[in-house]
Image: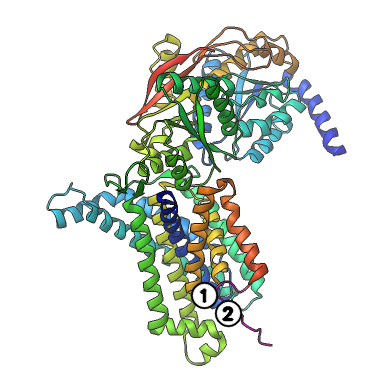
Amino acid sequence: MFFASRLSILCAVAMTVSPVFASTIKIGEVGSMSGSEATFGLSTHEGISLAVKEQNAKGGIKGKKIELINLDNQGKPEEAAVATTKLVTQDKVMAILGEVASSRSMAMAPIAQQNKVPMISPSSTNPKVTEIGNYIFRVCFIDPFQGKVMAKFAAEQLKAKRVAILRDVKSDYSVGLSNFFTEAFKQSGGEIVVDQSYSSGEVDFNSQLTSIRAKKPDAIFIPGYYTEVGLIAKQARKLGIKAPLLGGDGWDSTKLFEIGGKSLNNSYFSNHYSQEDQAPSVQNFIKSYKSEYNKVPDGLAAMGYDAAKVLFAAMEKTKSLASTEIRDAIAQTKDFPAVTGNITIDAKRNASKPAVVLEVKDGKFLYKSTVNP
Amino acid sequence: MAEFIQYLINGLSQGGTYALIALGYTMVFGILQLINFAHGEVYMLGAFTGLYTSKFAGAQISELFNRLLNGAPDQTSTLTAILTSIVIVLIAMVVCALVGLCVERLAYRPLRSSPRINLLITAVGVSLFFQYSGQIVFGSDPKAYPDLFENLESWTFGTDENLLVINPLQVFVFVTAIVLMLILRHIIFHTRLGRAMRAVSFNHDLASLMGIPTDRVIAATFMLGSALAGAAGVMVGMTYPKVEPLMGSLPGLKAFCAAVLGGIGNVTGAVLGSFILGLAEALLSGYGTPTYKDALAFAILILILLVKPSGLLGVHRTEKV
């Protein structure tokens, strides 16, 4: 323990001194490049890489090229913590971008905070993530808002009165979002008829769905990640459940269709942006992403791109690229024109932004509505 | 009532896949007193074999059956879907039998005369080897299984209040599992190979003195067990269309618990234990807390070791000194 704290002080000293003289600006990225949520990490990485490439083409930051160091956490919180420690102590990065999943961001944040390395999560929506310390930021909305969006959508657009919940007890994201949805839906006069749970990694949800079916809900809220959601949708339809399925931004992956197929028709989820948005910022981003990777970016790619852009803009504003300066500059971000909407970082280091509701239909995400905070 | 029956159906189809895995554990244990921890990974390899077979040859196989039976290449009926599935299951069984043979030949046989703990550690090593080389070869992101039964309607009984849904896939899995178990039973009790297997499991040295080629019998046991695990892998892949290289570890451990519950070394016991476990899990997640579903198997394991260590159908063997 003594050595550990000694080491971290040493590293903190090294951190504040060395980067100023380095020839490149090192930025760390931790993501799930493999594992069951691999598309999250891969999409985010593509978004970030595109932003880095564009910035370097413009001459980098303060004349220095950006060097992105990307580490895989295999979708495991403990690996995310190890990767963060490595980035901070060995690679001596100036800032960290990551993670998508809240559970993993929460494993990384204490390490970044302790070493005073600014960290921006592109798309972790659990409120607890940025509460860890004043070096931790995010560029996405948070779950209390996302829960409200879907509760409102269920009550007003779907006219649902009785909703069932199927949550992933292993994920901070899913548990948090379920609670916020429940709160908001009850406030609007609705009723949660049954609250069932599963653990991510499971494949059989027939029993939970059978007990949900018995309650005849108007809709089922499943705030999980795409791998399980695909299976759940399939099993739900096979059990004869026709009610619409609702979810959050954890659904955003093309793998969702590969697994769930047609069973996902009549499903809706909240997300950070819609590819159908005609705003020039969105269409320009889609164009350059397409020419780079030859595919349409999903929401997580857009969030990764935005997180990197916010960081670069903040770095440009600093005098000496010291970590306290970068931190302050990120905190002062105001009306930054990003792909997923204008970003203003609030006092709690969250971004306040609109959310979109998308409909899943025959392997496509169709734009349904936009909800402002 | 209908809800209860639905849980039973879900539990039976889950129990069927556990049973196919548990049989391999119990056969190998019966003959070598070795807990083959790599067994769950053979199941995973079976699932991947099924995945790639149906991806690259599934359409052709299905077309062939359609042409033979329906006269038109693109008319898929329940029968042709079932026949295609059976062919894919068979291919996976063959591949897994070969994998089982290789594992036995390369990893276990050289250690046959060494202390049992060495074998056990090797088994864990083989298991990790498959898990991690699987991640390199197949990639660690989950893969989606093509759905051969996509266009088939589920059978529904009863009306709104008492709805009961059985999907053809669940029935296919259950029936295939039962048929494979009956075949296995026939092999063990009514063939020369089965008699030799029973002899080797009774006393290895004595059997070899009687002229039984024990090495070959042990290899055959591994092949049989692995083939069943391969079949389970394909059927799980079809039912829950998501496969990944680490998918074998948890079902493997659960099937092991089921084998111990039924009495490890006992073939009927393994099947019984698996169905009990499958039903218990389905009922627990239906009426209780699904969060503890995975813990249930291990709770049962601890309980059975405390109360009746030889398992439900196991016979307590006195150690010969």
Residues behind callouts 2 and 1 on a single chain: yes
Q: Is residue B315 magenta?
A: yes
In this view, B269 is above or below A38: below
* Residue, disc 1: B266
**Quadrant including the N terminus of chain A:** top right
Which residue is at 54% across, 70% downward?
B262
Label of residue B315 in the image: 2
**Foreground residue, A367 or A38?**
A367
Q: Amino acid at mark 1?
A: Asn
Q: Which residues are magenta?
A: B310-321
**Foreground residue, A335 or B70?**
B70
Q: Secondary structure at mark 1?
A: loop
**Quadrant including the C terminus of chain A:** top right
**Foreground residue, B237 or B56?**
B237
The chain identifier of the residue carrying mark 1 reads B
Main SS, magenta residues: loop
Q: Is residue B152 left or right of residue A55?
A: left
Can residue A277 be seen here? The reply is yes
Which residue is at 56% across, 30% downward?
A178
Q: How many marks?
A: 2
The chain identifier of the residue carrying mark 2 reads B
Labelled pair 2, 1 in contact (Cβ < 8 Å): yes
Can residue A252 be seen here? The reply is no
Percent across and percent down for residue A272 are 49, 20
Q: Amino acid at mark 2?
A: Val
